[in-house]
Image (tube, rainbow, N blue to C red):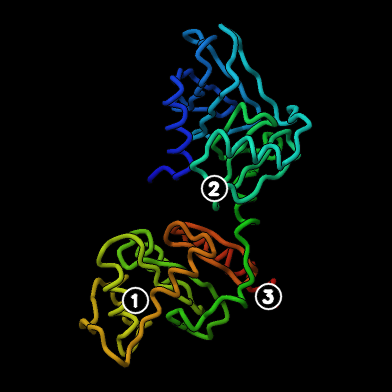
Amino acid sequence: MNNPAWLSAIRAAAAAAAIVAAVVVPASASAADKVISTQSAGQPQPGETVTSTSGAGPAAKVTSTAGANPGEKVISTATGQAGTADTEQVGALFSQRFPDLAVTAVRRTPYGLYEVQVGMDLIYTDAKVGWVMEGPLIDAATRQDVTRERQEQIGAISFDQLPLKLAVKRVTGDGSRAVAIFEDPNCGYCKQLRHTLEGIPNLTVYTFIYPILAPDSRTKARDIWCAQKPGQAWDDWMVRGKMPPASGATANCNAPIDQVLALGQRLMVRGTPTLFFPDGSRVSGALPQDELLAHLDKSSKKGG
């Protein structure tokens, strides 16, 4: 999985400031966790431990521009102090430190940090932007993934406002369950998800063909959209590897590729598959069948 753009920018900034690395050992940490300091003086001593009870996951990484003193052990809790700076000041400081990142929003959190939103990615920092943490952030008391819950809240949309005329529609059974999915014809995880969908009855799927992964994704998207039965053509390709005949650029077939691309950018769809449910929730990735059914049933009940 590729690193998000914001993380690459942060690493580039840290590299330019002479990075020094130390090991992080949070409550549920793995040996891969790291703390990065851009402070040239006061380098961490060999074997120094940074302990966190905020529950950052095994992939969590922390970047520091504040700098610990030699041999100092840093202990972070979920109720740490965030200072008195407001969100505008934090946003301005963050933009100064990382000018290549476009900040979407900055919010206070109830656990002493600031949440910086960059697109659909969430980054955590203190009031002085001295520390920057890559999630997931876990509530140590409840074991809930705070980052994932927040991303679902931020990514929520009104299903009724989706331009479904731009999607390929496929109905099985009575179609009482519904989901809209952004998929690329060259996406392996999308094909995996399609196999999962084959086993779910009474389902309406709206597929926004979102060609972002390969040079020929647009061509495949056009040929499937322009097929006599686009829904069947999409399933034939994604499940059975069978493409419809090439349509070419015909006057009577105008595949809405650019409109779908613009829609995905507006909804901040960064990867495929991305699923939207009638209750407004958003989920990324090829969900296993039980989790997918839970989302579909929850969404169906909420929708009445």
Which mark is drawn over residue 303?
A: 3
Which is more N-terminal, label 3 or label 2? 2
Position of residue 102 relative to residue 256, above or below, is above
Q: Is residue 89 left or right of residue 174?
A: right
Q: Residue at x 62, y 37 (%)?
A: 124
Q: Residues within 10 Å of mark 2 (few under 14, many from 20)?
A: few
Q: Amino acid at mark 1?
A: Asp
Residue 251 drawn at (x, y percent): 29, 91
Which mark is drawn over residue 199?
A: none
Q: Amino acid at mark 2?
A: Ala
Q: Out of 8 and 184, give the one closest to the viewer.
A: 8
Mark 1, secondary structure of its residue: helix
Residue 192 drawn at (x, y percent): 36, 62
Mark 2, secondary structure of its residue: loop
Whether tag 2 and tag 1 are in contact, CB under 8 A, the answer is: no
Q: Residues within 10 Å of mark 1 (few under 14, many from 20)?
A: some
Position of residue 165 relative to residue 117, above or below, is below
Q: Out of 38 and 303, give the one closest to the viewer.
A: 38
Q: Which residue is mark 2?
A: 102
Q: Residue at x 43, y 19 (%)?
A: 18
Mark 3, secondary structure of its residue: loop
Quarter of the C terminus within the rendering: bottom right
Q: Residue at x 56, y 23 (%)?
A: 65
Q: Which residue is mark 1?
A: 235
Position of residue 294 relative to residue 251, above or below, is above
Residue 86 drawn at (x, y percent): 75, 38
Eye-nearest disc, 2 or 3? 2
